[in-house]
Image (cartoon, rainbow, N blue to C red):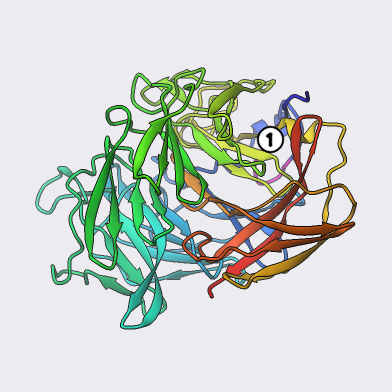
Amino acid sequence: MATASWEGPFFWNDNSVTPGDPPSSGDLANLDKCYIPVHMSHVYDGTKPYLLVWQYGSGSEGHQTPEARLWDINARTWDSNVPFSYANLFCTGTCQLNDGSLACAGGHIDNGYGADEMIIFNPVAKTWTRKAVGRRGRWYPTAIEVRVNEGGTWKYKVFVHAGTVVATGDMDVDNVRIPQLNTFPSNSWTPPRDTETGVLDEDPNVRHYYPHLYIMPDGRIFKAGTEYQTQYYDIADNAWEGSATFLTSDTDYASGAMYEPGKIMRCGGRSPAIATTGRFDHSTGVWNSTTSSMAETRRLHNCVILPDGRVLAIGGNRIDLYEEPRFTPEIWDPATNSWSSQPQPGRLIPRWYHATAQLLPDGKVIVAGGDSDTEFNAKGNQTPLYQIFKPAYLNTTAIPNQIATAPSTLQVGSGNFNVLLTRTSPITKACLIRLGSTTHGFDASQRYVPLSIVSQTLTALVLTAPSDQYVAPPGNYMLFVMIDEDGEKVPSTAKYVKVTPS
């Protein structure tokens, strides 16, 4: 069996992308120009994939408007700056949209004091657009796109929930318990600003930052925590409804992922951290424990869905924000409901508070950010070093079957479609993985969608498109196909596909 490995660390600053380890003295002299992605989103402009990243900002406390930047994934170089002159997008809630854009809700005024913003990034035009402000500021909210039927017309809206705001007339920080919906392109808010008319149902349970929200196969939103009480929100009925209790009490700064349509895993959290892992199945409405918990307790970690359907838990720590870092990644296999420990990187860099991670189209995972106490400190005591985790499936002797051609767009419910391959090795698995957008240990956009294999003849593969846009919400995805060899499901390099509505 092959084993996982690491690349890097590499240094992210204005002048150098991959200078090797350690950074040169010239790099160290320019630490003020380094880049640390507290927010990391995978975007695609129709030709090239990028990571859109931003950090604290440039003020002495890091609370001025930050500069955003695009990193060319294939070339591993900076492509361009994409500055904006709006609110500070540190601590926003971000989500992928059906047209491939990225929505950013809320933002930073001061610790606990959320900005009142909705700002959209268009990766094709590489521009920002400021939408109408919401009803109240939000600091550490979650945003997720939903599809709503209004009078027979389907509309896409961004559902924004939770976060904190300074209460009017004092400096006490309050949880924002009432969600909001922003409709595009009309850019109207429900409820409208400065009115209680049409207020969405209040959530009495929300207590933690960045609640875990997912679109379920029936179109409802499921809040999978990190509170003990988890529940649905039905846009049609404008109400929180149903409930399912997690396996243990509130687990702030847990992480998780939708590893199959309607199926969610959640792991870790709390301080001191726990190792508990649970699975929620929409078809039963019940949380179940896995056969084993993580080998290490952890919080503030990132969970990344891999092309073979497993979930990587990476980074984290045991206590509060900066105590007892976790350097050993683990991979959870839903087929066996078990965890396996992975090799540590050569350089042990804490990937805890403010660390980010994203799946890359070659099947590797980039790990970056994290407040750190190392010799390579920069703004806010953060690390400018990033690393690449290379799963074992990329270290086999197998030659993966690559995708020669695939549709650039794929309509939901359109039936079968053709994929041409470079080799004749039998394909045993195929999937779509939605592009992610992560911060503070959670990614509300990534999801794994398995694809049915209809037939394969030599280098021609026939797959079936997702049948429902709640299973595969429209937007940009990576298409992977896999062969089985050396005990591993070895993935191709991904092709980018835009899933469109039916």
Which residue lies at the image location 38% right of the left edge and 21% below the top edge? 273
Picture coordinates of residue 139, whole percent (x, y): 31, 49
Q: Residue at x 13, y 67 (%)?
A: 196
Which residue carries the number 1 mark? 388
**Residue at left offset 24%, top offset 44%:** 206
Relative to 365, 469 lies left or right: left
Residue 179 drawn above or below residue 399: below
314 over 365 or under it: above or below: above
Q: Is residue 48 left or right of residue 138?
A: right
Q: Is residue 91 visible?
A: no
For this rendering, which residue is in front, 104 or 168?
A: 104
> Looking at the image, can residue 173 be seen?
yes
* Residue name at image x 44 percent, y 64 percent: 85
Compare residues 394 and 230 and report the one nearer the observer. 230
Tell me which amino acid carries mark 1: Ile
Image position, residue 350 (x, y; %): 53, 25
Label 1 secondary element:
strand
Residue bounds of the magenta highlight: 8-17
Does the magenta portion include 434? no
